Image (tube, helix red, strand yellow):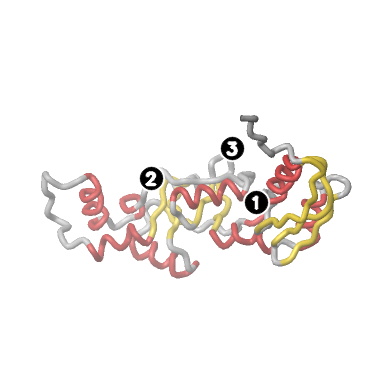
Amino acid sequence: MAIEVKDVMGRVAIAVHEDASFGDIVAAMKRYAVGAVTVIDLERRPIGVVSEDDLLHKETDTVRHSVSMFESRRQRTEHVKAQAVTASELMTSPPVTVTPTTPVRDAARIMLDKRIKQLPVVEPITGQIVGTLHQTDVLRVFTRPLEELAADIRALLPKGVSFYVYDGVVTLSGRVARTSEGTALIEAVRQVEGVVDVSSELVHDSDDLLIVPPEA
């Protein structure tokens, strides 16, 4: 059974309103020990995200009031953020969000692809923020109770195949009819939430993946 965002997410929506000041944003980050906050409108809908990187422009940009026609788009954006004083001016928009029913595996992929450490969780109908998913929340799938993990694995195994789990590594043993069947089984178990790796001690009655070269 796929674990969804709602099973591991934080129920606190770490957010500030769009008119929040620079100081308010820093205070919110410090209070919740996070590196970013979601910016929401009056209807509690995410409209952007302010990260520590956005705030650091205030310290690192020493040419805040001088704009050159030869500047790149990125440099102009940095100058604007260096002069910004409210969340709406500092934020990166639109925000990347997930819903409570997003599979955790998909959320983890988004975090990796976008190189972000937390995601606002929104209610799909209203678009309102209902929580925050952190990288540490995603990693909780690897501390699932052993009974839950074992039940999900057992549901995938055919008769004649057994397993044991140690430190998240699943070892399969027993007999299957074909090599391809064993390969598919290993991959299916590897996809179970909380499985770190799969080791195989399976015996195959026939190797249907063996390629026999043609006779000369």
For the point 51% across and 46% down, the residue is 97
For residue 176, what is the image quadrant?
Answer: top right
Amino acid of disc 1 = Lys
Residue 125: numbered disc: 3
Mark 3 → mark 1, Cα distance in angstroms: 16 Å
**SS for dot 3:** loop
Q: Residue furthest front?
A: 216
The answer to whether residue 204 is above or below residue 214 is below
> Do the numbered discs 3 and 2 sit on residues whose CB atoms are within 8 Å?
no
The answer to whether residue 17 is above or below residue 181 is below
For the point 57% across and 54% down, the residue is 131
Amino acid of disc 3 = Ile
Which comes before the other along the chain, label 1 or label 2?
Answer: 1
* Badge 1 density bin: few <14, some 14–19, many ≥20, Cα 10 Å: some
Amino acid of disc 2 = Ser
Residue wearing tag 1: 6
* Image coords of residue 76 (percent x, y): 21, 48
Q: Residue furthest right?
A: 159
Which comes before the other along the chain, label 3 or label 1?
Answer: 1
Which comes before the other along the chain, label 3 or label 2?
Answer: 2
Residue wearing tag 2: 93
